[in-house]
Amino acid sequence: DFYAHHPGVSAEPEIEMFNLNRLAESGWRAPHLLLATDGIWDMWTYDEVAERLVPAAGERPSSSLSADFLHFCESTRAKSCEYFNEAADNLTGVFLSLDGQK
């Protein structure tokens, strides 16, 4: 955990609430939720994650969200091992589509 040992890390949770119906009405392109450990966030920016996992405007969503996420996790593991070898951090994530479709 590269960042957790620096001063200023807090155990206080940050909580946000969203009405999922309003997300759909707002025109967001295929809203998704990714809950992930630092093993993922140490490797990618938010924009890079969105580029890899969320379909671009006008693109059809993948038929297999779980296969896409598995491929993303394997890419993350490989990238982490390339940078950190045996010291690569573990990674855990939950990826959900919030658009009411598959």
Image (cartoon, rainbow, N blue to C red):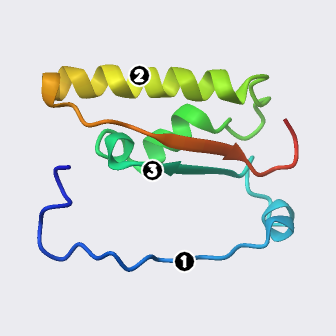
Q: x%, y% of residue 76?
A: 38, 28
Q: CA distance from mark 3 to mark 1?
A: 18 Å
Q: Secondary structure at mark 1?
A: loop
Comes first in the chain, label 3 or label 1: 1
Q: Point out which mark residue 26 bears.
A: none
Location of mark 1 (residue): 15
Location of mark 2 (residue): 75
Q: CA distance from mark 2 to mark 3?
A: 15 Å
Q: CA distance from mark 1 to mark 2?
A: 29 Å
Q: Amino acid at mark 1?
A: Ile
Location of mark 3 (residue): 46
Q: Are marks 3 and 1 in contact (CB under 8 Å)?
A: no
Q: Where is the C terminus found, in terms of image quarters?
A: top right
Q: Is residue 63 left or right of residue 47?
A: right
Neighbours of disc 3 within 10 Å: few (<14), some (14-19), many (20+): few
Residue in the image at 45% along x and 50% along y: 46
Nearer to us of marks 3 and 1 is 1
Q: Amino acid at mark 2?
A: Ser
Residue in the image at 28% along x and 76% along y: 10
Nearer to us of marks 2 and 3 is 2
Comes first in the chain, label 2 or label 3: 3
Q: Is residue 58 left or right of residue 73?
A: right
Q: Secondary structure at mark 2?
A: helix
